[in-house]
Image (cartoon, rainbow, N blue to C red):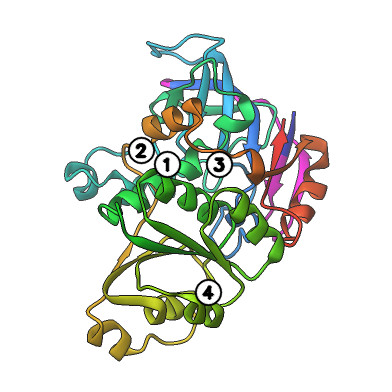
Amino acid sequence: MRAVVYTASGDVVGQERREPVPGPGEALLRPLAVGICGTDLHPASFAFDPDVVMGHEFSATIVGLGPDVVGWRTGDRVVVNPNGILCGACDACRCGKANLCDPARRASIGIHRDGGLAELVAVPVQALYRLPQALSDEVAAWVEPLAANIRAVTAAGSVLGLRALVIGGGPMGLLTLQLLRNAGAAFVGVLEPVQFRRAVADQLGADETYESAELAESAASEPLQVVFECSGSPRALSDALHLVAPGGSITAVGIGPAGPGVLPMDLVGKEITVRGSSLYVGEFPLAIDMLARGSIDVGPLISGVEPLERYAEAFRQMRRPEAAVKYLLRP
């Protein structure tokens, strides 16, 4: 079967792989639509295992079942939680923080075990969520990133009536923008250097967009009480600390290289709350429901849909933020 694989030499290549056979507790899936994540563009930086089939944001159809599987049948359409192979026994699992389960992270689908960029993949059924008929294959591929952003916005507490800033106009930032609008923020600005992505943010309801932190600071007529850092830019957290109002909060979602040091006066003197938000715990059902109801519009975020054979072109386009937000592949 055809597959897209991250190799030991550090390349992303198309390969012919043996068709998987589902083991006990597993389902054999035929992926339908697979999102290319920003982490997929830098697999070495995110410790992807070599010789693993990529793809961790995907919808699929069950085409086979392994032994001892109950509650599922062939033909069911599903979305996959790539970090859903939980041990259930570690401290994180026992205290309700499954997003911090280390065994689950070391078994992450599409990163440490084969994922959705193939004609077939075998996945433990504990990682599956059933999809409603109304949700298209392409839109369902957004469930995983949306679940992560739902957790981030929820972790920040109520934003009702507050003024918010999103740093980064990529997929995560544009989802966060919409979630903040839905949650009743009085103002949502987006800081994004690329004009194309600022235009998408405008289309999705941003109150203001800014090319730089300096412009955001000069244009702000009132304090920005909550900031979401979704870019992973080296200087973004420093910018966030500078821009957020005294007593405000920052939620870090983006992952990237280290940037300039944080000024203690910004952190301590302004009494800022800074939190990180990682993955998801129970947000998948809500993400499915919001997409099915149309509460989140991912149409403007889909820059193209390509067949699996054109994976190289899709990856190339994803490296052009001036023209793309996200590409999907259809195995």
Q: CA distance from mark 4 to mark 2?
A: 27 Å
Q: CA distance from mark 3 to mark 2?
A: 16 Å
Q: Which residue is mark 4?
A: 257
**Residue at figure coordinates x 48%, y 9% from the top left:** 73
Q: CA distance from mark 1 to mark 3?
A: 13 Å
On residue 147, the disc is 1
Q: Over which residues does the magenta segment extend?
A: 4-25
Q: Which residue is mark 3?
A: 56
Q: Nearer the viewer, residue 190 or 268?
A: 190
The amino acid marked with disc number 2 is: Glu
Residue 38 magenta-drawn? no
Q: Residues within 10 Å of mark 1 (few under 14, many from 20)?
A: many
Helix, strand or loop at disc 2?
Answer: loop
Residue 56 sits in quarter = top right
Q: Position of residue 105 (x, y in %)?
A: 41, 49
Q: Quadrant of the C terminus?
A: top right
**First-in-chain label (1 vs 4):** 1
Any part of residue 328 in sight: yes
Q: Nearer the viewer, residue 308 or 153?
A: 153
* Residue contact between numbered discs 2 and 1, judged by CB atoms under 8 Å: yes
Asked if 131 appears above or below 107 in the picture, the reply is above
**First-in-chain label (4 vs 2):** 4
Q: Residues within 10 Å of mark 3 (few under 14, many from 20)?
A: many
**First-in-chain label (2 vs 1):** 1
**Residue at figure coordinates x 55%, y 27% from the top left:** 122
**First-in-chain label (3 vs 2):** 3
